[in-house]
Amino acid sequence: MAEIVHDFFPLMRVYKDGRIERLAGEGFVPPESDPETGLQIKDIEIDPQINLSARLYLPKNVQKIPLFVYFHGGGFVIESASSPSYHKHLSTVAAEAKVVIVSVNYRLAPEYPLPIAYEDTWLALKWIASHANGDGHEPWLKEHADFSRVYFGGDSAGGNIAHHIAIRVGLEKLDGVKLEGIFLACPYFWGKDPIDGEGENLGAKDFVEKLWLFANPNSLGLDDPLINPEKDPNLCSLGCDKVVVYVAGKDPLRFRGFYYKESLEKSGWPGTVEVVEVKDEEHVFHLFATETENAMSMMKKLVSFLNQS
């Protein structure tokens, strides 16, 4: 029997012989349009040399509409833009909110350790932004995306990415792009010192720390600004005015969602941040129980967020 050297059940295992076994997030849904809603869906290559791609969603009968750039979760090690749960979730968001969506398919660790995922998503964003002044060649973005109404979103590791890419927008700017807000679902943040109720679940801290160092082997640990926003000297540079964070009552990461709000407010960032706690739900509940009252309420909140004037 092959010896396991890294066991991140239920996400993945790595064996001594180098074999990587992903236990989740391997499903693939083709980019087929939805005749019921008229939603069009397609996959596009952003940079074939590094296998950077995205899935695009376009509602029917639209002119210029908001642009929602989405980053999937999965601990930086599993899932993709074409996974069934993300395909279903974003199809619903696009149809309900009437927004153009670009769901970025960044490369995964350990084959591509962090910070590659952050660099991939920044490259994708620069490619998206190239359409703001007419240089890009993707007609759905040129003809329908309103670059004065751009939003980022993500869950878990994708929420972490959305936050960091928003910081980079604040620091470096993107010509022709106005980032209005970010919507983070159960974002993947942590820190070295336990806060609130974290000390009661040392198993969760151990798992998060091991997974983080596995995905980012050159990191110094849980006070790395990439996983602990409070330690980031550029936190006040977050490049939008509005943030909504969803946390789940049974999720060990929930304390960090509240702490993120506190840290943002203390940093001098001038925007508004709201945390919504959903009791009795697990991590990223909205992806797996989409028809529940809590998931539908979250969808309603997201649709409203993407359509604020």
Image (cartoon, grey):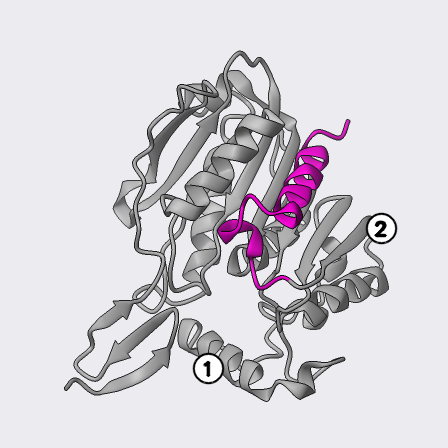
Q: Which residues are magenta?
A: 281-309
Q: Secondary structure at mark 2?
A: loop
Q: Is residue 293 magenta?
A: yes
Q: Residue at x 67, y 64 (%)?
A: 280
Residue 129 seen? no
Q: Quadrant of the C terminus?
A: top right
Q: Which circle marks residue 162 in the picture?
A: none
- What secondary structure prevails in the magenta region? helix
Q: Is residue 51 left or right of residue 161?
A: left
Mark count: 2
Element marked by disc 1: helix
What amino acid is found at the position of numbered circle 2 in the picture? Pro
Do residues under tags 2 and 1 come within 8 Å of each other at their CB atoms? Answer: no
Residue 231 vertical placement versus 156 (above, below):
below
**Label 2 packing within 10 angstroms: few (<14), some (14-19), many (20+):** some
Q: Within the magenta stretch, is there residue 74?
A: no
Instruction: List the residue tagged with mark 1.
Output: 210
Give the farthest residue toward the front: 292
Q: Position of residue 137 (x, y in %)?
A: 40, 23
Q: Is residue 167 above or below residue 259?
A: above
Q: Which mark is residue 270?
A: 2
